Image (cartoon, grey):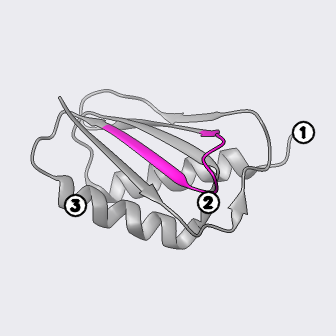
Amino acid sequence: MEKHQFEFHGGRVRAPKAAPALVGVASSGNLEVLIEPAKLNGACRIEISTAALGFGKIWEAVLRDFFERHQLSDVRISVNDVGATPAVVSLRLDQAVDEFTRPAS
């Protein structure tokens, strides 16, 4: 198991609600994403646990793209990965943000 942590600064979108959002399922070839508000002095922190070893640069590129699109601040994201492709990672991250920012009904 390999672990990575990335922190991005300069986001403009604050957590809209206190409830965390969980999407996906950690099973063969997939991943789960938990997104939650956190007091991080405006930062967006993303923590990765992955079974795929040696892909740190690819994780960084995918997460940088994600941050540039969503500009989150004071948010912690936890990713449990079992070998998902970069496209699936992006999809799950986008799903988590959609769920997280959806107004409560």
How far across and down, in percent of the image, does residue 27 sit? 31, 27
Sequence-wise, the earlier of marks 1 and 2 is: 2
How far across and down, in percent of the image, does residue 15 sit? 73, 50
What secondary structure is found at the residue carrying circle 1?
Answer: loop
The three-letter amino acid code for the residue at tag 3 is Ile
| Callout 2 crowding tier (Cα within 10 Å): few <14, some 14–19, many ≥20 | many
Sequence-wise, the earlier of marks 2 and 3 is: 3
Q: Are marks 3 and 1 in contact (CB under 8 Å)?
A: no
Q: Residue at x 25, y 52 (%)?
A: 85
How far across and down, in percent of the image, does residue 35 sit? 57, 40
What secondary structure is found at the residue carrying circle 2?
Answer: strand
The magenta region covers: 36-48
Give the residue pinned by disc 3.
Answer: 58
How far across and down, in percent of the image, does residue 100 sit? 68, 45
How far separated are the C-alphas under marks 2 and 3? 20 Å
Query: What numbered label is drawn on residue 41?
Result: none
Q: Are marks 1 and 2 in contact (CB under 8 Å)?
A: no
What secondary structure is found at the residue carrying circle 3?
Answer: helix
Q: Quadrant of the N terminus?
A: top left
How far separated are the C-alphas under marks 3 and 1? 37 Å
Q: Disc 2 vs disc 3: which is toward the camera?
A: 2
Give the residue pinned by disc 2.
Answer: 72
